[in-house]
Image: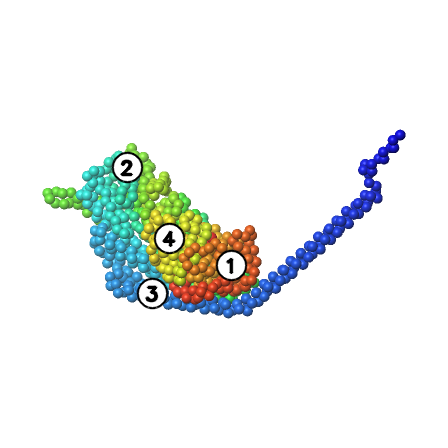
């Protein structure tokens, strides 16, 4: 018989002893593995601790070294700033004295705007002048406008309330007199309407133009009930009339003034001189001033609207545009103040002890008008335009309808004309019920008007229309219907309930916040400041104390592009042309910002200007993520007109106490304040930059002209790219 096969042990279950032994082995392996991992973690922690201690020791060493030289560095910086400020102040004083002497030597008969008696005499003599010829009247108005410009400058700079009152009264008197002269000249033309009638239409139409005014007149001689409207082809202005007016003896006038005195009057009616408010450069909270500011939703009864006399007695001055002057004037240097600050001092305390940016730049305080400011006008809510949020552009269009003056007739060789003692009379429209025929509707249809956009203005968005309310002396947007804008033809048309002056408006800060910016040197005392705005990009070349605007947008800017002018002059011209990149202390109410400490920001602009001939500076996305107490900026040494190579930039962290070069780059995944290995800390940004600059670059910074430094600093302070980008 064959032997029996033995059963395999594979199918046998492990015994309890075997299981216990196996578990013991697994536990031992796990214990050894955990001990090994714990040992590795301990070694890693120890290594990290040693590295951290090393960094802390290095940081303490750098901080100690920075403290030892802090006073010396800040004294050097303060000396540079004060030296430049003294030179600029002297230059400006000499320029003012020279301008005064040149004005005196003109001997053109124009009054001295600072002498009220001379201004009053000039106004009285002109008021009594019987001249009504439109050409000569416009020449006289041109001289009056020059005087008004001088008075506006004096009003902006006035610190004494009585002086401000004097200049304001002169401005209002001249404004009223200019408009009165326009009416007299208009009446004189209309008296001869029948003699100058168009043979084709049977009506009279004429256009008179000069550099400041375009006068379009139409006289209804034919009274054709089928008449709809008329377009003045050479001016791009037109109007539409309802039947009630088409059959009336009327004259329509569209007077386009390229200046805007009504907005000036609106600001006079709302803005007051206030005691200097303690407000941060970044536009933080301010200590309440003596005069309250109107809040949104404020309601006034009609009887509470102040009359002209009260306005002249209580309101002292107006600031029509933001000036960009030396950032240090009237304000202690931010860098010098910086030396007295301590890190333990709360940010709120620092902000409450400094002057506003507008005061620091030599401008005057403005009180923002409320967009939804309401008053009771005939029991209806009045929506008033906020002139801080919206800016009138292209001047004012006066849209009027008058009774046609009696026309001359010829009898036996005699020319006979009825003379009216009251002069030019406004035709009431909407017409009163008594003036309407029985078969006419009791409601009067609106009147239409069309306007070609002025060729000296850029509208970044579709323009908005506002009409003038003479009762409250403010611009309003209600009562305007059927607005149609043709962007291709640059033409806007709309209808109003009555004949009123109107303006075209644009959002003041439509081009903010900036998407990016760059300031790079082109050579000694020359730089290019580029801003990529929300809607339009532009560049400004700075050469000494002169600036030149560059932009791919040529339409509306041909009178500015490629022309040298002073910084303040360029700023005014850009604002008047609808290209605004400039800010004030109220801008943050309308534009999102990355709020920054005002002293740190101002100190950065001062030092960037000092090194603008040898270093390039640029926007960094990390500036919005480093906190309010710090700034992050890209910088590098750069010579020549070529663009900055991408790999040349380094990131710098600027704070109240020190500046440092960062280890991270613009492409890093997260923000880190770790300083660059091998670099040092400095109390001043310029000394931080010097650590990485060549001897030639440092020499360039020492040879910068003070007017160039002032111009760069003024431009940076006026745009505040570290805050609004």
Quick check: 197 left or right of 11?
left
Q: CA distance from mark 3 to mark 1?
A: 38 Å
Residue carrying label 3? 95
**Tags 2 and 3 in contact by the CB under 8 Å rule?**
no
Which colour style is shown? rainbow
Q: CA distance from mark 2 to mark 4?
A: 44 Å
Residue carrying label 4? 550
Asked which secondary structure carries label 3, the reply is: helix
Among the 4 quarters of the image, the one containing residue 446? top left
Q: Say the numbered circle drawn on residue 228.
A: 2
Q: Which circle, 2 or 3, is nearer the viewer?
A: 3
Q: Earlier in the sequence, mark 3 or mark 1?
A: 3
Measuring from the top left, give residue 318's x and y in whole percent. 37, 57
Q: How dense is the environment of label 4, judged by Cα within 10 Å: few (below 14), some, or many (20 and up)?
A: some
Q: Residue at x 82, y 45 (%)?
A: 20
Can residue 4 be seen by looking at this rendering?
yes
Asked which secondary structure carries label 4, the reply is: strand
Q: Earlier in the sequence, mark 4 or mark 1?
A: 4
Most distant residue in the front direction: 1
Q: Is residue 122 above or below residue 216?
A: below
């Amino acid at each position: 018989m064959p032997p029996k096969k033995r059963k395999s042990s594979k199918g046998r279950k492990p015994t309890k002893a075997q299981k216990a032994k196996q578990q013991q082995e697994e536990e031992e392996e796990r214990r050894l593995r955990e001990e090994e991992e714990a040992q590795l973690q301990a070694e890693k922690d120890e290594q990290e601790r040693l590295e951290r201690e090393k960094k802390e020791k290095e940081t303490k060493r750098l901080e100690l070294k920075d403290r030892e030289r802090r006073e010396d560095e800040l004294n050097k910086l303060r000396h540079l700033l004060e030296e430049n400020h003294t030179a600029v102040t002297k230059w400006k004083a000499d320029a003012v004295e020279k301008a005064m002497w040149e004005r005196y030597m003109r001997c053109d008969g124009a009054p001295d705007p600072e002498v009220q008696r001379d201004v009053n005499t000039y106004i009285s003599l002109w008021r009594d002048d019987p001249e009504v010829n439109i050409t000569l009247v416009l020449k006289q108005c041109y001289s009056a406008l020059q005087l008004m410009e001088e008075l506006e400058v004096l009003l902006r700079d006035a610190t004494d309330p009585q002086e401000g009152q004097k200049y304001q009264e002169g401005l209002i008197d001249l404004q009223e007199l200019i408009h009165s002269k326009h009416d007299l000249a208009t009446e004189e033309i209309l008296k001869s309407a029948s003699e100058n009638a168009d043979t084709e239409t049977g009506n009279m139409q004429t256009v008179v133009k000069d550099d400041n005014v375009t006068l379009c007149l139409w006289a209804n001689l034919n009274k054709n009930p089928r008449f709809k409207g008329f377009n003045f082809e050479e001016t791009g202005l037109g109007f539409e009339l309802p039947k009630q007016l088409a059959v009336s003896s009327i004259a329509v006038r569209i007077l386009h003034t390229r200046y805007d005195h009504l907005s000036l009057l609106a600001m006079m009616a709302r803005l007051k001189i206030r005691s200097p408010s303690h407000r941060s450069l970044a536009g933080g909270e301010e200590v309440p001033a003596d005069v309250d500011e109107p809040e949104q939703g404020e309601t006034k009864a009609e009887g509470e609207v102040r009359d002209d006399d009260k306005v002249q007695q209580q309101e002292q001055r107006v600031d029509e545009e933001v000036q960009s002057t030396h950032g240090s004037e009237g304000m202690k240097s931010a860098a010098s103040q910086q030396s007295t600050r301590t890190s333990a001092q709360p940010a709120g305390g620092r902000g409450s002890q400094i002057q506003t940016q507008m005061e620091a730049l030599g401008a005057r305080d403005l009180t923002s008008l409320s967009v939804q400011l309401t008053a009771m006008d005939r029991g209806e809510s009045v929506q008033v335009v906020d002139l801080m949020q919206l800016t009138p552009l292209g001047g004012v269009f006066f849209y009027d309808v008058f009774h046609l003056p009696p026309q001359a007739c010829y009898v036996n060789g005699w020319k006979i004309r009825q003379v009216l003692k009251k002069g030019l009379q406004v035709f009431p429209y909407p017409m009163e019920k008594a003036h309407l025929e029985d078969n006419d509707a009791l409601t009067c249809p609106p009147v239409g008007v069309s306007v070609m956009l002025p060729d000296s203005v850029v509208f970044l968005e579709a323009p908005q229309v506002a009409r003038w309310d003479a009762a409250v002396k403010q611009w309003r947007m209600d009562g305007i219907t059927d607005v149609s804008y043709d962007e291709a033809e640059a033409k806007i048309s709309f209808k109003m309930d009555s004949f009123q002056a109107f303006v075209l408006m644009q959002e003041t800060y439509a081009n903010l916040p900036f998407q990016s910016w760059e300031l790079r040197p082109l050579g000694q005392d020359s730089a290019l400041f580029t801003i990529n705005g929300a809607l339009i990009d532009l560049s400004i070349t700075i050469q000494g104390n002169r600036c030149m605007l560059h932009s791919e947008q040529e339409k509306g800017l041909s009178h500015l592009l490629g022309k040298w002018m002073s910084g303040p002059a360029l700023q005014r011209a850009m604002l008047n042309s609808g290209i605004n990149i400039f800010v004030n202390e109220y801008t943050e109410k309308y534009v999102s910002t990355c709020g920054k400490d005002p002293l740190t920001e101002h100190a950065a602009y001062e030092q960037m200007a000092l090194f603008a001939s040898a270093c390039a500076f640029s926007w960094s996305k990390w500036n919005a993520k480093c906190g309010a107490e710090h700034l992050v900026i890209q910088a590098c040494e750069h010579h020549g007109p070529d663009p900055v190579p991408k790999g040349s930039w380094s990131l710098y962290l600027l704070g109240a106490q020190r500046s440092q070069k960062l280890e991270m780059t613009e492409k890093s995944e997260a923000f880190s304040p770790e300083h660059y290995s091998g670099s040092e800390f400095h109390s001043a940004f310029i000394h931080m930059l010097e650590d990485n600059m060549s001897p030639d670059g440092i020499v360039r910074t020492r040879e910068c002209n003070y007017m160039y430094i002032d111009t760069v600093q003024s431009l940076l302070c006026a745009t505040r790219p570290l805050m609004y980008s």
